Amino acid sequence: MAFAATSKVMHPMHLSTTSSLAPMSKLQPPTMAACSKSSLKGLKMCSGQRSMAIANQQTLQSEHYPENMACYQCSQTAHGKGCFSNSGVCGKQMGTSALQDLIVEINKEIGQLANAGKLTPEMRAFFLESMFSTLTNVNFDDSRMVDYIRKGQVLLAAAKGESKSVNDFASEPDHWLEVAETYSHAARQKNLDPDAFGLIELATYGIKGACAYMFHAEAVKKQAPDAYPDQEANQVIDGLLKIMAAMLEPTKHDLLALSLEVGALNVSVMKMLSDSHRALLGIPSPHEVSCKLKPGPCILVSGHDLADLKILLEQTEGKGVNIYTHGEMLPAHSYPELRKHKHLAGNWGGAWWEQHGDFKAFPGAILMTSNCLTAPTRSYRDRIFTAGPVGWDGIPHVQGHDFSQLVDCAVNKAKPATGDEVSTHPAEKVTVGFGYETVEGVTDTLLGAIKGGQLKDVFLVGGCDGREAGRSYFTDLVKQSPDSSVILTLGCGKFRFNDQELGNLGESGIPRLLDIGQCNDAYSAVVIANGLADKLNVKMSDLPLHFAISWLEQKAVAVLLSMLHLNMKNIYLGPNLPAFLTPNLVKALVDNYNLKLTGDAEKDLKEMLQ
């Protein structure tokens, strides 16, 4: 499939715009009669389809509780089935996992208050941060989990007219671990059909991802109050909470429709995050970023929170401390209000999973603003700090955006950079900043390349990276992509190939590899695709747009649900399937969206280009 102009046909999922790349309007999810609760049981198991490799899928069984944890919310879950021991692959301990299950259940009860119209700003804020804390590689600190649980109890008590404080509720983790047994996977699954339980998990993990994005948007909005209307944010948060409440009575709801509604709400969340970033930080634009260290004291900022980075840059202005980004913070260099700080000196290292090597080789202080945090090693444990929802037992946590301890560590305790350090990422420079506004500026050039045959295909390759060897698929796919194609990339999955020299698209001067931002900038990718479809007078589904999505955790689940809500099909997802999807659910996604599991890059590329 390649670009070919046709007459304009309006499509139910077409995004009408007033300009070539205007933001999306809210869309309705497609009809999914074949996947409703009444028909799920009638779906047969997939057989003989390489694209879905479902043989090893399994649901959690009661035998795993209470002796061991039961968690399968990320792609790296043990053996592709689930973490059923006293600790997870990510390093999360059994007790932490149980406390996080309880936090989710508390938020379901708060969701009931959304149905009753009794939500308060404090409840909405609690929902976002506490759910964010349960994401993969965010918070491993049991004391912080207990703090969230106690605060949730105070909020629920207030809704009943009871005046309570956190001191009225137990502070011992063991007390809450006993309570949490009631809400374990096994306890919740006991009387549910496996398909229904899988859909509840799908919606829950999507909500976790949406909460993380909304948390970031609200953090930015505190510095840019006019970024988006409060009413819009409240409607989305309340909508997510109502879905949480619906899970308390799963037999009364169409669970797949609820999952798709999570995707719809997450589209709105990603738009608000995009709008807030632009309101506070300016319009992103292309910028070449150095991947080397300069001599002098330094701080490395990892995670996703650009609002935290802005505050840190302001607090370190004129103090002789260089600030570097890591992982998903790389796109920070595309925003003019961050770039104007000359001590934002570059990017260090690659994706989150390489942090042990990156952080060890980095001599200065380190700040984790969000996921993905892994167990700190002795080589840097005394110079790493957490912020926001992030936590690790014994690691200093920044309160109220006061980064003075972090800065003191960089200046007086950690070693200064010499400029000779070597990171895990081979690139000396990378280019970022190809948001939808930048692409809109070269629309005429792209159209000319399409008409002249220089541009025939567009690939969206990105998402969350991870340790698995199978993720080399994405490197191979990009390397083998034809010269007549453009690669849009986002998320930390880009580190698999953003050091590649792919050159320009013909004589257009447009780079073939366009970094459009963080994982949440999937919104920008859709706006770009919509703009091209509008200019070419075709359906967006008729574009030769190919998806290869790398998933790891719950933000990726939220983005996938958004893509399904937008009726995007033929998505290649990898390196494995979510363990929480039963064979019937996998078959439903195959039948309705032609979802595929990544396999051999060369073979898949041929399929895409047919």
Image (cartoon, rainbow, N blue to C red):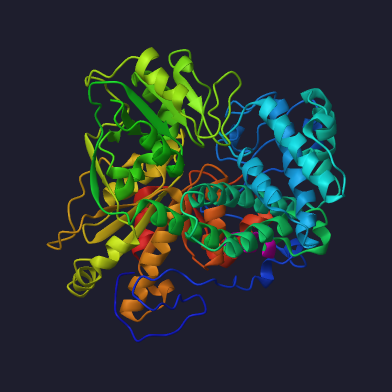
Regarding residue 598, the answer to whether it shows in the image is no
Q: Quadrant of the N terminus?
A: bottom left
In the rendered image of this protein, does residue 421 appear above or below residue 330? above
Does 173 sit above or below residue 41?
A: above
Q: Which residue is drawn at 54% across and 34% down?
A: 400
Spot occupied by residue 340 in the image (x, y as percentages of width and height): 27, 44
Would residue 299 be seen by someone viewing this image from the given angle?
yes
Q: Identify the image quadrant of residue 255.
A: bottom right
Left or right of 34, for residue 333: left
Residue 184 located within the stretch drawn in magenta: no
Q: Tell me the residue at 59%/25% (across/down).
A: 91
Which residue is found at the position 45% from the left and 75% from the top?
A: 15
Question: Percent position (x, y) of residue 12?
Answer: 52, 79
Question: Left or right: 423 with respect to 265?
Answer: left
Q: Position of residue 333 (x, y in %)?
A: 31, 44
Query: Which stretch did the figure color magenta?
Result: 257-263
